[in-house]
Image: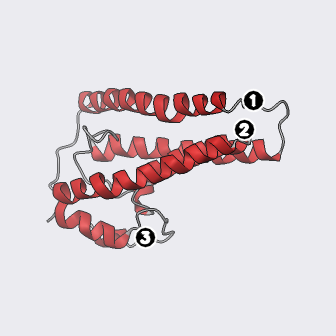
Amino acid sequence: MMQQELPKPSGWTIAFVLVRTITYATLFVGFLLVFLPARVLSWSGIVRPPNIGAAQVVGLVVGTAGTLVAVWCIATFIVIGRGTPAPFDPPRRLVIVGPYRFVRNPMYIGAALALSGAALFYESWALLWYSAAFALITHLFVVVYEEPALRAAFGDAYMRYCQSVHRWWPKLKSGINDVA
């Protein structure tokens, strides 16, 4: 099944998708990646480290890399997919470019890296466990809900994409050209 060519989006269409995406991303990021981790740190009695050492530098690098990957994914969803990362307002087109050329779930990987970077920065085992729980719950969500929904929405094109690109482990050289 070839993906239907959508007309070029107007500036208003892109703006509307951008507003929807910012709203969802703010709620998602604010709750799962800021509010809850802050609660975990507070409950475990961890505060900002008094000195910046190797763990903090590595944590900042990992966290920043994860954030940049997630932002790249969101931008790709807006421009290419014409939708948001929200399960209730997904992209209208199958997104297989940008970071999605290398791995099927780069946004979740970016979020997990951001959380892991924070765990390193604060040297917090509790936050590392939160990151692991986030990764496990995300995996279950992807397998139980997201992949079946994508198969139903995009059919053979999604199946070919799954055969070419791994779910979690990036392929540095992708066979994605055969998908579309």
Image-quadrant location for residue 118: top right
The amino acid type of the residue labelled 1 equals: Arg
Q: Residue placed at 52% from the left, 35% from the top?
A: 33
Disc nearer the start of the sequence (1/2): 1
Image-quadrant location for residue 82: top left
**The C terminus, quarter of image:** bottom left
Whole-percent x, y for residue 168 in the image: 46, 62
The dot on residue 122 is 2
Q: Residue placed at 49% from the left, 65% from the top?
A: 170
Q: Which residue is mark 3?
A: 174
Disc nearer the start of the sequence (3/1): 1
Image-quadrant location for residue 37: top right
Q: CA distance from mark 3 to mark 1?
A: 40 Å
Whole-percent x, y for residue 110 in the image: 52, 48
The amino acid type of the residue labelled 3 equals: Ser
Q: Residues within 10 Å of mark 1 (few under 14, many from 20)?
A: few
The amino acid type of the residue labelled 2 equals: Tyr
Q: Residues within 10 Å of mark 3 (few under 14, many from 20)?
A: some
Q: Which residue is mark 1?
A: 48
